[in-house]
Amino acid sequence: MMKLLTPNIDHLPAYVSALRRGWSPDNLRPEAAQEQVAIISKDAASFVSNLDNPNAKGGPITLPDGSKVPRLPSIRRWIWDEEFCGHISLRWKPGTEDLPPTCSGHIGYAVVPWRRGEGLASAALVAVLPEAKSVGLKYVDITTSPDNPASVRVIEKAGGTFVRRYTADKALGGHETIEFKIALM
């Protein structure tokens, strides 16, 4: 049974195992996996504590093009079903649903390849929506590649409605993107 876990040191070995097996927590930067392994090996406790960051502590975020932008408040949850299965994150700008153009939606998720197709991303997305509402959001925007029909199905199963097709900010790679909106009741 799928559950969302706040990242913790006890479950960190399973996370590291997924990174070493080739899974990346960043859909735009596969090299993030090995970067995180290096960070964890230096200070695992700090790594875990920084994953849940509702107060936007810390310095700026480095985008795929190397530019830096201010950090947004965010939370991360590990998708767990007898083992580490991936992660889902929520980010927001306090007091508004608007996001900067360098942030590709309120919610991002990634499931390890060996557990895809089991409905874990859909269940995780539905499970994180109450947390989005609790930080004051009336809706969330979620983006994906038009070449990722599995992600489109995940979003639609959670109540996502198509908003637009556009070219992402060049700092995010300038690729074709589709945006969905999920109203939070």
Image (spheres, rainbow, N blue to C red):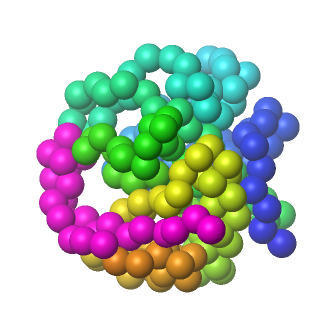
Does residue 44 appear in the picture of this structure?
no
Quadrant in the picture for the C terminus: bottom right
Question: Is residue 68 in sight in this rendering?
Answer: yes
Give the quadrant of the N terminus. bottom right
Residue 167 part of the magenta-drawn span: yes
Q: Which x, y percent locates residue 105? A: 40, 54
From the top left corner, tell me how far across and down residue 76 is, in percent.
62, 44
Residue 121 percent location from the top left of the image: 60, 69
Q: Is residue 151 magenta?
A: no
Q: Give the residue drawn at x 57%, y 76%.
A: 158
Q: In this orientation, which residue lies closer to the viewer: 20 or 1?
A: 1
Say which residue appears at 42% left-offset and 60% top-offset: 141
Horizontal and vertical percent position of residue 39: 56, 24
Q: Give left or right: position of 53 versus 49.
A: left
Residue 97 in the image: above or below residue 129: above
Residue placed at 77% from the left, 50% from the top?
5
Res 164 quadrant in image: bottom left
Total numbered badges shown on the rendered structure: 0
Return the residue nearer the eye: 82 or 4.
4
Q: Is residue 85 left or right of residue 158?
A: right
Span shown in magenta:
163-185
Q: On the picture, is 141 further left or further right than 146?
A: right
Against 135, residue 128 (above or below) is below
Residue shown at 59% from the left, 25% from the top: 55
Determine whether 101 is above or below 129 in the image. above
Nearest the camera: 41 or 80? 80
